[in-house]
Amino acid sequence: MASMTWKETFKSYLDKRLLWIFMLGCSSGFPWVLIGSSMSGWLTDAGLTRTAIGYFGSVFAVYAINFLWAPLVDRVKLPFLYPFLGQRRSWIFLCQAIILICTFYIAGLNPVHNLILMSAVALAISTASATQDIAIDAFRIDSFSKSHSKLPQASAMSVIGWWTGYSLPGYFAFAYADTLGWNHIYYGMTVVIVLLMLFTLFTGEPVTQRDELQHQAEQRHTKVVKSKITAWLSVTLIEPFLDFFRRNGAQVALTLLLFVFLFKIGEAFLGRMSIVFYKEVGFSNEQIGDYSKLIGWGATMLFTFIGSMFNVRFGIVKGLMIGGVAMASSNLMFAWMASVGPNEHLFLATVLVDNFTTAFSTVAFVSFLTVLTGQAFSATQYALLASLGNFGRTTLASFSGELVDYLNNWPLFFIITALMVIPSLIMLYSLRHYFHNLLEKAKDQR
């Protein structure tokens, strides 16, 4: 099949469904402001240690296990909400409502005196957010099936939306934190959540064959498994897992899962400590907001769009390889900044390089996971794959603060994070022919 021209590639983005993906991407990224970057800034200003801040991030661990309740998002119809919003949007709206209540509550706490309670509320936000992500990812997959040519475009809009929901509110948070105080910043965050809930109401529910496919799978298994509980587990959890191994083969499936687990682990270790590092190296909250959030958001928007066009033109595998190498290289920029000190020009260069590599690799990675997902179990299988990727990003990265304290050497820490991506790139290279064949099969289905 001939490659698309640049004009055709650009016109492929003129699809209103991509706007919906962008809106929901904003909802997906915003909770990472609440319990991620802004929380790290709040806890650092409150005087907590690196290790404590790193361990606070363990509230993100639910992202690594959200596949366990992904079948509920795939199958359970929420009373009152489902008739009006449909399967995907009803779950998204419910999770946003929970996040709204928890954010309003956490805004009234003091991290010095209420750290345990704040952690519990942050865990509730994380759980609702991880559940919301299941529905959002399934919404995107249902909207653009593997037989469709717009996977990179949909992935790009999802990534751009995520970074918009993460960076713009983050910019305002850091820009006004010293003036208003973090408690008032979090009260202001509740307004953002209300806007995101309105976005959810205005999007359109995707039309899919998912229900029919799952119904057929349920009928097959009910004949064999008589226990209702066992039948539920078989159809909603075991079957999606076995389906992934059947379609790919045991050896390839295990290699794919290991790649997904390792690919972004270095980026995760760096990301968890980035705000702490910026502050320790000598940058103010306002500078962090200007460079890391505002400029970083603009750079991510641009580079995500460029990266998605590259993936459309030249393929997801090349995008992953280039993104992985660039991602490791960008970590070395942080090591350089740690040696030089609070130089704003170097800070700007580091932010630009880091956002380029993050955006480029993330678009390819999301497209990669989507291609591996079976249509009959879109929410469950994507959640399983994304959970593996999130395990390093969330759970293991909680030890990043302890690693920095142990090394007591920021440049060495960043060099180690750069080396973490090498094993995953070796695995990707070994599977390049298999993945090319998988993509060709998807093209033939069109």
Image (tube, grey):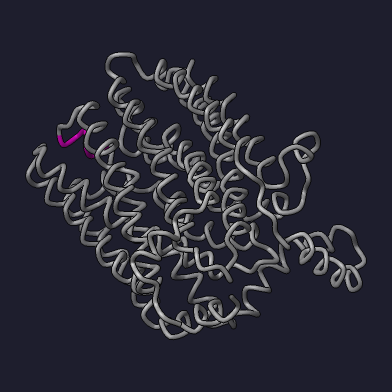
Q: Which of the pair 128/440 is nearer the observer?
A: 440
In screen coordinates, is 410 left or right of 111?
A: left
Question: Whole-percent x and y of residue 280?
Answer: 19, 34
Question: Image quadrant of residue 56?
Answer: top left
Magenta-colored segment: predominant secondary structure: helix
Q: Which of the pair 156/365 is nearer the observer?
A: 156
The residue stretch that appears in magenta? 276-281
Question: Whole-percent x and y of residue 8?
Answer: 40, 65
Question: Residue 278 colored magenta?
Answer: yes
The residue under the point 29% across, 69% down is: 322
The residue under the point 53% across, 53% down is: 64
Question: Whole-percent x and y of residue 101?
Answer: 59, 24
Residue 424 seen: no
In screen coordinates, is 190 left or right of 311?
A: right
Question: Residue 183 colored magenta?
Answer: no
The residue under the point 20% across, 45% down is: 408
Above or below for 272 versus 431: above
In screen coordinates, is 359 left or right of 126?
A: left
Above or below for 93 versus 224: above
Question: Whole-percent x and y of residue 126?
Answer: 54, 39
Residue 286 seen: yes
Count the labels in the image.
Answer: 0
Quadrant location of the C terminus? Answer: bottom right
